[in-house]
Amino acid sequence: MDYKPLNPSKVYLITGAAGFIGYYLSKKLLEQGCKVIGIDNVNDYYDVNLKYTRLEKLASFDNFTFIKGDLADKSFVTEIFEEYKPHIVVNLAAQAGVRYSIENPDVYIQSNIVGFHHILEACRNYPVDHLVYASSSSVYGANKKVPFEETDFVDHPVSLYASTKKSNELMAHTYSHLYKIPATGLRFFTVYGPMGRPDMAYFGFADKHFAGEPIKIFNNGDFENDLYRDFTYIDDIVIGIERLLSNPTEGDVPHKVFNIGNNNPEKLMDFIHTLESCLSNATGAKIEFNKVFEPIKPGDVPATYASTDQLQKAVGFKPKTSISEGLQKFADWYVEYYRVGHDTIIEVSTKS
């Protein structure tokens, strides 16, 4: 596949560096000798100790600089670009979560809309080689046509979170059109793995179980018409991003959007049973969740399923980690990190 590799002489700015994907991407770049400037506001949407653990690991690299700050502060963003003059910007900072956007809409507008606007303005005033930014599979809403393709109609989001991500794509397209900023949006599909986000279902299931609480499954207990999710392991996601960094889209409007998923959706219940098995392996004890079935939540969609043809064509990206392999790595990390089996109480960190 003909694509340009990473250039260690470039300066990489990664927002959301204390986050799940931001941490793994920063680590990957640092290991290859790249200079990485990490930004994060380290908010308390989920356990900040996990965020600081990630940052401590990144701080062991001499070529890593961390700056705590909020993208909603325009002067802060401007000062970062003025001082460090990044060549490649990866905007992963965002208020995440579909259900949380129903409870706390204001923070989504500030972080996902206002913050992203400040990044775009900075890229306009301090030209960059490439802006890569996080979109989401949630932009597909309740589309029934599968697999989801980048050319599909995405004007009917079913959550505010999805609306902000669709807005990001529109904003980036406009700035690319007006100011020729090379920009690439990535529609992520349910990313999971060790050191992941505690607000994600798989992590929350483990938390709930070890806290002695039942897990809630929002599929009405309908196993015939179960929810499907295109779970994508973190290492696969990072490889896809890494390959894109030095390969911006060219043309009159240098903007493109890619799906970045596993192209292999799993039934939610199959995923849960695999997680039980992997936690059993990690603990040496039989793990079976106490399950409570409830109606699907507002903003949730029945299925996510990515077509990854475009990304594979562009940079040869094809995820390869199976659910059993990826969940076992998560389970092993979880049991070690939270010292499961060492009389340690697991604090449930998931927002309900």
Image (cartoon, helix red, strand yellow):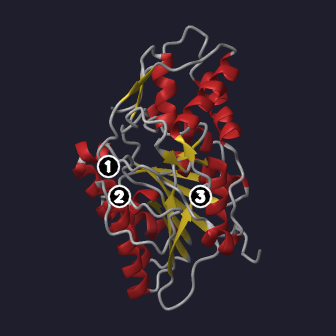
Circles 1 and 2: CB atoms closer than 8 Å: yes
Q: Amino acid at mark 1?
A: Gly
Mark carried by residue 21? none
Mark sitting on residue 299? 1
State the image coordinates of residue 147 (x, y, percent, origin top left): 54, 62
Observer-side mark, 1 or 2, equals: 1
Indicate the amino acid at tag 3. Val
Q: Earlier in the sequence, mark 1 or mark 2?
A: 2
Q: Residue 163: x and y, percent?
A: 31, 61
Mark 1 is surrounded, within 10 Å at the Cα level, by few (under 14), some (14 to 19) or many (20 or more) other residues, namely some
Look at the numbered disc 3 and give the secondary structure of its residue: strand
The residue drawn where x is 58% and y is 45% is 266
32 with respect to 296 (left or right):
right
Three-letter code for the amino acid on which mark 2 is drawn: Ala
The percent coordinates of residue 60 (x first, y second) are 65, 42
Q: Position of residue 223 (x, y in %)?
A: 48, 36
Residue positioned 29% across, 45% down in the render: 298
Instruction: Give the CA distance from mark 1 to mark 2.
Output: 9 Å
Residues 268 and 322: in front is 268
Residue 63 visible to the viewer: no
Which quadrant: the C terminus?
top left
User: Considering only vertical position in the picture, is 303 above or below 178?
Assistant: above
User: Which circle, 3 or 2, is nearer the viewer?
Assistant: 2
Quadrant where the N terminus lies?
bottom right
Dot 3 and dot 1 residues touching (CB under 8 Å): no
Do we see residue 251 in this rendering?
Answer: yes
> Of callouts 3 and 2, which one flags the residue occurring earlier in the amino acid sequence?
3
Please name the residue that numbered disc 3 is placed on. 36
Count of numbered tags? 3
Residue 162 is labelled as 2
At x 44%, y 75%, the residue is 123
